[in-house]
Amino acid sequence: MKPANENKPNFVPAPCPVCSKPSVYEYRPFCSTRCANVDLHGWFTDRYAIPAVEAEDEGPDEDE
Ligand SMILES: [Zn+2]
């Protein structure tokens, strides 16, 4: 008893969040590695682009 879709349990091809094409199981939720990379790139640039301005706490504190 081995269903052919054993590797894809209840996979529903949702639209790719990048280009809105039907997603592919291997790259879900995207339709391809390209879109996955695009999204990853956008994610990183969007949320990890935090300005490095929080270095004010690194002063010499040996005088306490
Ligand atoms: Zn896509």
Image: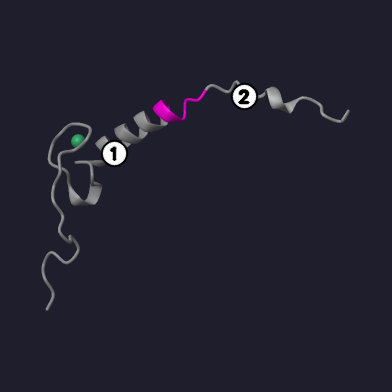
Marks 1 and 2, Cα distance to the nearest angstrom? 31 Å
Q: Nearer the viewer, residue 43 or 41?
A: 43
Tag 1, which secondary structure? helix
The span picked out in magenta is 45-50
Q: Which mark is residue 16?
A: none
Residue with the mark numbered 2: 54
Q: Is residue 63 above or below residue 6?
A: above
Q: How many marks?
A: 2
Residue with the mark numbered 1: 36
Tag 2, which secondary structure? loop
Asked whether 49 falls inside the magenta stretch, the response is yes
> What crowding class fits label 1: few (fewer than 14 Cα within 10 Å), some (14-19), or many (20 or more)?
some
Q: Where is residue 45 in the image (x, y as percent from the top left)?
A: 41, 27
Q: What residue type is labelled 1?
A: Ala
Asked whether 9 falls inside the magenta stretch, the response is no
Residue at left offset 46%, top offset 30%: 48
